[in-house]
Image: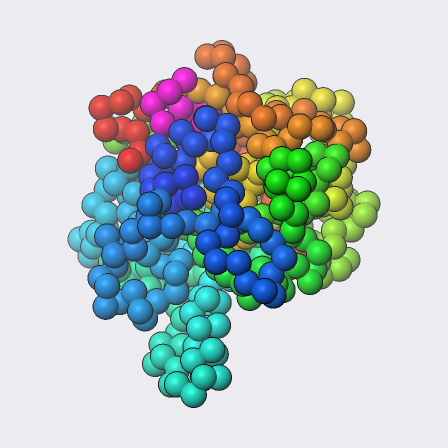
Amino acid sequence: MPHDPVIIGLGSVSPFGTGVGAYIAGLRAGVSAVRPLPAPHPAVAARVAAWIGPEQFTPSDHVPEADLKRLPRLVPMALAAARQAMAHAGMPPDRPATAAARRIGLILGTGGGGIDFTLDQAAAIAAGRSASLWTITNATHGNLAGELSIRLGLRGPSWCVSDGCASSSDALGLARHLLRDVPPDAPGAIDAALVVGADAHVRWETLHTMELLGVIDTRDPLEAGGPVPRPFDATRAGFALGEGAWAVLLARPAAAAGRERPALAAMTGFAATCDAFHRVRPDPDMTESARAIELAVADARLRPDQVAIAHLHGTGTKLNDALETAAVRAAFGPHAAHLVCHSIKGALGHPQGASGIAALVATLGAVLGLDGGAPFTPATANLRAADPACGLDCTPLAPRPLAPNAPRTILVNCLAFGAKNSAIVLQPTPERPTPDGHAPP
C-alpha cells in the first residue's frame, strides 16, 4: 500500500513579515495585514490591499540587485520561502550534492506568475523604450519554476501548475502523487518535493481588471463602518488583493525517517474536480465542490466526522462564501455543524494562486504553535455579523486555543476561476517542534 508523504519543512513571506514565525504570530494576534494602498490610481476604486513592503521583506537579501531588474516580483519571495522550508527540514538551502539534488523536485503553483514584469515591458514599449531581453522567459510561468530550481540547484522535475486560485493546492496534489504513487526505484523517481505557492501582483492594472469582475471590495473602511474584507459576514462585498510566497517540503516517509527533526504532518488526502459550468462563477448546486471534499476525505481513509478543522477558501464575495459553505454542509452532513472553520483572507487578503499553500502553512503552523506559542486555530478576521446563509462556525474575530487532546485533522479547501475545486487533508503529527531550532525561522 502506498505511504502518504510527510511535511518536513515550511516557509513563508507574507504581509506579516518574513518567516513562518512572523506569519503565525500575526494570525495569533488576530490582526489584519490589509492596509491602505501606497499609491492610489485613478483607474482603481479599491482603497486597501495586503501588500508587502520593505519593512516585511527585502528582495536584495535573497537575489542580487542586478538580477532584481530582470525578474518578476514573486521570484525573490518564492526563493526566500523555499530556502526557509529546506532549512526548517535541516537540509542545505542551496545546491545540494548532485545525487541528492536529482532526488528533489520543485513545483511552483502560481496564478499570475510574472504578469507584473510583462505589464512593465508593455508600458516601456508604449513609451518608446525597449522591452527587456527576459520578457518572454518571465511571461512563461514554467520558466519561473526553472528560475527557482536553478538558484536552488535542484535537479529533479521542475514544474509549474497554474490553475488560478487552486494553483498551489494542485501543485501539492501533484507532488503527493509523485511521492506516494511512483515507486522510489522507478526511473527518475524523487524522494522529496519542494512545493512553492507564490503570487505578487498588487498593482493598479490587476486591481482594475478584478474590479471589472466585481470581486474586489472597493469600500473605504472608514466609510464602511470597519475593516474590509469580511469573509462570511452579512456585509461582505468582495476580497482584498494580497501577495506573498509560501513553501512546503514534502518527503517520502522512508526518506524522512531517522531525521533529528520530526515530520510536521502527513498529507493523507487530495482531490480535484471541475464544475464544467462557468469560467468565473461556481455551479450553484456545488455538486463538484462537495465531491472534491468527499473524495479527499475518502482518499485519506477517514470518515467525514474525523475531520476537525476546515480552512475554507472564504474570499469574502457574496456568492462564493454562501456557495462554498453550502458545499461543505453537503459534503459533511450533520458533522458540518461541529467543524471549526476559518478563512485567513480577512487577515491576509487573497494571494490568488498561492492561496492553498498559504492556507496550509497558516492552519498547520497554528495547530502546531510554530511561532513558539500554544496551539490554536486561526480566526476569520473582520467577521462581526455572521451571515446565516453561510451556516458554519467560522471562528469570528479571535483565534481559539487548541486543547492538547483536541482532534487536529485538517481540511484545506480551494475554489478557482475556470470551475476548479481542490481539497487537501492533513493529519498533523503529535510532536510539537521545540524552541531549540526545530521551529521554522
- Asked whether residue 67 appears in the rendered view, the answer is yes
The magenta segment is 364-374
Please, is residue 315 above or below residue 385 in the view? below
Whether residue 276 sits left or right of residue 169 in the image: it is: right
Q: How many marks?
A: 0
Image coordinates for residue 34, horizontal then vertical, percent: 51, 43
Image coordinates for residue 390, horizontal then vertical, percent: 75, 33
Specify whether residue 385 is painted magenta: no
Which residue is at the front of the view, 30 or 157?
30
Image coordinates for residue 152, horizontal then vertical, percent: 26, 56
Please, is residue 117 above or below residue 333 in the view? below
Which residue is at the front of the view, 404 or 382?
382
Q: Magenta part mainly helix, strand or loop?
A: loop
Q: Residue at x 27, y 28 (%)?
A: 438
Which residue is at the front of the view, 131 or 164?
131
Specify whether residue 365 is painted magenta: yes
- Of all residues, the one furthest to the left in this rendering is 97
Q: Residue at x 74, y 51 (%)?
A: 282
Whether residue 242 sits left or right of residue 263 in the image: it is: right
